[in-house]
Image: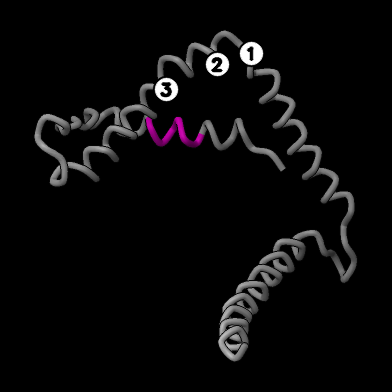
């Protein structure tokens, strides 16, 4: 019973500051809507409409042939390439040489493409 009290006090000691930090972040994010001590509901409504428009655009673009081919030609190969880099980095010294290989880097002028694809995924899949 005494051990549970110690564990409980340790867990509450860790969770309490995290909860306070989360609440503080929420308060700060809501401060941008506060004008002269009152909440600007219209600004909140506008932000909500922007998010809804992004979701509607993502739904409309989901079945677009260009988006579909873009996924097939760019997003899937970059995902496979990144997974191979992680596999190669994690298992190079651990596995026999038959099960590992060198994953070549992209040419310098194409280094931005994986980052652009990740940014596109975050923008197009944004849900709130």
Question: Percent x, y for residue 39?
Answer: 88, 62
Dot 1: element: loop
Q: Which residue is mark 1?
A: 63
Between marks 3 and 2, how big is the CA–CA gap?
12 Å
Q: Is residue 120 left or right of residue 90?
A: right
Question: Percent x, y for residue 98?
Answer: 11, 29
Decide: is 76 above or below 40: above
Work out which quarter of the rendered image holds the N terminus and state it: bottom right
Question: Percent x, y for residue 104?
Answer: 18, 30
Which residue lies at the image location 22% right of the left edge and 38% below the top edge? 88
Which of the two labelled residues, at mark 3 and mark 2, occupies the earlier sequence position?
2
The quadrant where residue 108 appears: top left
Q: Is residue 15 left or right of residue 38?
A: left
Between marks 2 and 1, how big is the CA–CA gap?
7 Å
Work out which quarter of the rendered image holds the C terminus and state it: top right
Residues in magenta, as a range: 114-119
Dot 3: element: helix
* Nearer-the-camera pick, 101 or 41: 101
Which residue lies at the image location 90% right of the left edge and 66% below the top edge? 38
Question: In the rendered structure, are the residues bearing label 2 and label 1 in contact, judged by CB atoms less than 8 Å apart?
Answer: yes
Dot 2: element: helix
Majority secondary structure of magenta residues: helix
Residue 117 located within the stretch drawn in magenta: yes
Residue that lies at the very extreme toward the left in this rendered image: 97
Q: Which residue is mark 2?
A: 67
Q: Which residue is mark 3?
A: 76
Residue that lies at the very extreme toward the bottom in this rendered image: 2
């Amino acid at each position: 019973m005494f051990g549970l009290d110690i564990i409980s006090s340790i867990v509450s000691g860790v969770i309490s500051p995290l909860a306070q930090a989360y609440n503080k972040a929420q308060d700060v994010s809501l401060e941008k809507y506060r004008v002269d001590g009152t909440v600007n509901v219209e600004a909140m409504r506008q932000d909500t409409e922007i998010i809804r428009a992004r979701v509607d655009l993502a739904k409309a673009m989901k079945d677009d042939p260009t988006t579909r081919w873009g996924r097939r030609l760019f997003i899937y190969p970059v995902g496979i390439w990144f997974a191979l880099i992680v596999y190669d980095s994690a298992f190079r010294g651990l596995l026999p040489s038959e099960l590992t290989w060198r994953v070549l880097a992209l040419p310098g002028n194409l280094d931005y493409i994986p980052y652009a694809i990740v940014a596109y995924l975050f923008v197009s899949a944004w849900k709130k």
